[in-house]
Amino acid sequence: MDRSVEGNDAGLALMAEGEDLSSCSARNDDDGLGLVKEEGVAGVVDEAFDEALLAALKQDLMKAVDVRATNLLRQPPSSSSFLEGIDEVDNSDSVLLTPPPKDKLGTAMFDDLMTDPTVFPLESPNSVLSARSTFQQPFPLPRSTSVTTKLCASTPTVMHETATAWPPPYCPEPSVFLVPQSTRSYAQGSVGDVMMTRLFCPMAQQHQYQSPEDEYLSQQAQVALSAAAAQGFPEPFFEAAEASCREDFPEHQCSVPHVKGRKPTRRRSSKTASSSSATTEKKNVKRKAQLPKKEQKPRTSKYRGVSRHRLTKRWEASCWVHKKQLYLGGFDDEERAARAYDVVALVCKGFSAEINFELEDYLTHIQILRHCTQEEVVAHIRRQSSAFARGRSRYRGVSGTEGRWEARIGKYDGKKNATFGFFETEEDAARQYDRALLIQKGRSAKTNFNVFFYQTEMMEYEKMISGLDPEQQDRARLTTTLPLDAVPPCQRKFTLLYAEHLKRALEFGQ
DNA sequence: GTCCTATGTTCAGAAATATG
DNA sequence: CATATTTCTGAACATAGGAC
């Protein structure tokens, strides 16, 4: 049975209804890109793996909603429930904050926002996704750019609504909004998507489509272009954006496949390798025949991007992007490693990438993942690898026993085995480990949970303290630990993580 | 809190393979 | 055949996790 969800919010609508996206397929129609749920259609071979991956991907969808939340943040402080319960500054060096009720934390808060059309009426989350999905990752623009400034300056009226929140209060680098490669903000979204759409759709259209996959890309480009037009940005905005972008980055390449370097060639997956062209096969046979016998070493894996580590005996997946090797993790199962490679290859190299399984297996993944940075995609994959956590806990950085889980990092701020507290649940400990790791390593931290969880947390925290005067806010950030209900400030037994540290890590981390 | 060990991660470079 | 890309390997380093 076919179950379509109308409009551009299809994916989120299905999510909201608790539907399993793994059995959805992508669909293009006049309204934009949607999802079609077909019961009884098994879209994937390794269901367990995909289930885990999709669970992580669903969290990523929340990213789209972050735009709305940012909007909410800039609304004047009110006597909302978040502000209630904030105690005034006490006489010690701490600002005591009462956390918002549990049911208002994290995604629950965003669920509310999602159903509120007044919060962010300009665009639907899925139109953002559609726009993002037009571009192949990685997008090779450097991080620092003055484009945003120019954009805002050139379009005072149209940008007015957004410009007041641009950048949001705790994101000091305006440029990040424009560069999908460095989508490191809460509010990256509409402007960046629109501009990128504008810049690269024409290039995509110039590309000579040669296959169904390319045709699909072409359709997506059209859809995204419509979405961009629907945003209502005027021509001068685009012209200024494009001109300044090209001026700043004359060397940048369109990441639509095959614009640079070799001409497009359709490679075959290993599944269909047997049907590759007779000429190529002949050549290969000839070449192999020319090699001395001892050099004809069999590959350790029949899958692309997968090799068996000689010492660890694990299947390792790695993908080369822009001459840089991306380590995707070690896997006990060869096929899982192959699928990990496939997902990353498709996201980072586009539909022209040679993969191990059918492209159709990954359409849902790709639709969701293509708006993520390369780093984020790799992080997703790495979380699924068998070797991610290796101890008693299924989470990294967590050890202990039932009811008393410790969050610990071997080396932190010059200390050995810094402890960040004991927690009742593994999840709480894992999150605390994540926070510490984010502070230590910034965005490159290999966290247990998606980094957007912590961004959400920071946003909630900022929202909470927004009613205090600036001085008190600064003090709150410097003296209050996160999570708000985990480590009482008086109990300085553990290494403390201050809100300010996490905030800075999320903003500046690499 | 310290120590130790196993193993995960990263990287560089050689070898193999693919492509124009 | 030249060049680009991918695969494989091993070493060095980092660190998670357990034991005490």
Image: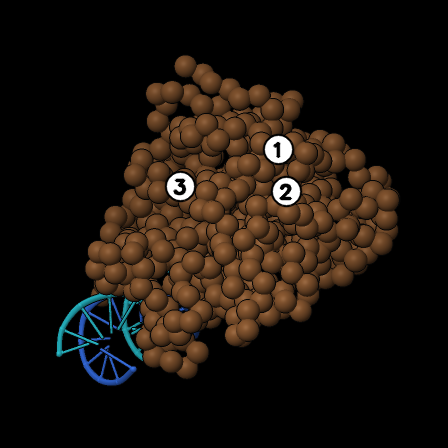
Chain colours: A brown, B blue, C cyan
Q: Secondary structure at mark 3?
A: helix
Give the class, few, some or many, for how many residues have Cα within 10 Å of label 1's Cα (few <14, many ≥20): few
- The label shown at residue A68 is 2
> Which mark's residue is nearer the viewer, 3 or 2?
2
Q: Position of residue A273 (x, y in %)?
A: 36, 38
Query: Residue at left 42%, top 21%?
Result: A38
* Subunit under mark 1: A
Residue A198 in view? yes
Quickly name the residue at label 3: A55
Q: Which residue is mark 1?
A: A116
Q: At numbered mark 1, what does the secondary structure look like: helix, strand or loop?
A: loop
**Residue at left offset 24%, top offset 56%:** A403
The location of residue A21, given as percent across then percent down, is: 43, 31
Q: Earlier in the sequence, mark 1 or mark 2?
A: 2
Real-space CA distance between mark 3 and mark 1, rounded to the nearest whole angstrom: 24 Å
- CB-based contact (under 8 Å), mark 1 and mark 2: yes
How far apart, in angstroms, are the residues tagged by discs 1 and 2? 10 Å
Report crowding for label 3: few under 14, some 14 to 19, many 20 or more residues within 10 A (C-alpha). some
User: Given the image, what chain letter belongs to the residue carrying mark 2?
Assistant: A
Vertical placement of A62 versus C12: above or below? above
